[in-house]
Image: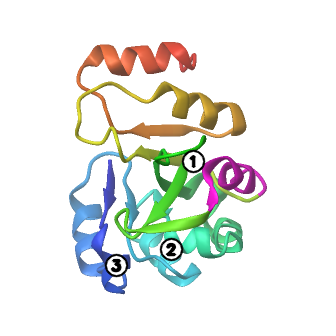
């Protein structure tokens, strides 16, 4: 289960540790939390509550060494980078966005994926902004790009409308 408080960064808020503790106490499955994490200390506190992984987005893009610093304390397997992406109106590739899709990051997705592979990141969550909520199936061009460039687990968001969509993604990338 992944909980992403997508408004924390936009509003400049820190993670609500009381809410996270409550979630961790009630959750009976692996839990990942993201939203407003900007320091190693916050990540350590969240993990100490029983949360398995922390998710970073804009903080990672601002300084990928934050992933390395967090991983050195809690382990690479517990560091997740969440990327919201969208095809540009013109041109090829994908743009990366933060702050609920309102701020375009300077580098394109392929560059960001290359950078991620050089840092201590255990997983990437990739959200196709265009497909999100559309029930149109996954963006396979996007999943192909990410799984080709990365040697870590990639979780796709945006587009699934059925178990067949999930099965097709698993079959395509030979996930066991």
Q: Secondary structure at mark 1?
A: strand
Query: Alpha carbon of mark 1 to alpha carbon of mark 3: how far?
Result: 23 Å
Q: Is residue 158 left or right of residue 94?
A: left
Q: Residue at x 52, y 75 (%)?
A: 44
Q: Nearer the viewer, mark 1 or mark 3?
A: 3
Q: Earlier in the sequence, mark 3 or mark 2?
A: 3
Q: Nearer the viewer, mark 3 or mark 2?
A: 3
Write down the residue under mark 1: 123
The reply to whether callout 3 and callout 2 are in contact (CB within 8 Å) is no
Q: Residue at x 42, y 72 (%)?
A: 46
Q: Nearer the viewer, residue 81 or 24?
A: 81
Which image quadrant for residue 164?
top left
Look at the picture and state if 81 lies above or below 61. Answer: above
Q: Is residue 11 left or right of residue 142?
A: left
Q: Residue at x 53, y 15 (%)?
A: 172
Write down the residue under mark 2: 43
The location of residue 31, given as percent across then percent down, is 37, 53
Rate crowding at label 3 as few (under 14), some (14 to 19) or many (20 or more) other CA atoms within 10 Å. Answer: some
Rate crowding at label 1 as few (under 14), some (14 to 19) or many (20 or more) other CA atoms within 10 Å. Answer: many
Q: Nearer the viewer, mark 2 or mark 1?
A: 1
Range shown magenta: 107-118
The location of residue 15, given as percent across then percent down, is 35, 79
Look at the image and say whether residue 97 sits in the magenta stretch: no
Main secondary-structure element of the magenta-colored stretch? helix
Q: Is residue 143 left or right of residue 68?
A: left
Query: Alpha carbon of mark 2 to alpha carbon of mark 1: how far?
Result: 16 Å
Display coloring? rainbow
Write down the residue under mark 3: 10
């Amino acid at each position: 289960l992944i909980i992403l408080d997508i408004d924390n960064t936009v509003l400049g808020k820190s993670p609500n540790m009381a809410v996270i503790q409550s979630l961790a106490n009630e959750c009976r499955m692996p839990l990942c939390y993201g939203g407003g994490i900007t320091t190693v200390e916050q990540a350590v506190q969240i993990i100490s509550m029983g949360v398995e992984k922390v998710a970073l987005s804009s903080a990672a893009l601002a300084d990928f060494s934050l992933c390395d610093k967090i991983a050195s304390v809690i382990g690479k397997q517990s560091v997740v980078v969440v990327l919201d992406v969208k095809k540009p109106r013109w041109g090829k590739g994908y743009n990366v966005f933060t702050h609920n899709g309102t701020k375009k990051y300077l580098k394109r997705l392929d560059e960001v994926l290359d950078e991620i592979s050089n840092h201590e990141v255990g997983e990437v969550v990739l959200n196709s902004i265009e497909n999100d909520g559309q029930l149109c199936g996954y963006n396979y061009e996007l999943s192909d790009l990410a799984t080709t460039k990365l040697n870590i687990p990639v979780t796709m968001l945006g587009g699934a409308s059925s178990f067949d969509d999930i099965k097709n993604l698993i079959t395509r990338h030979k996930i066991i």
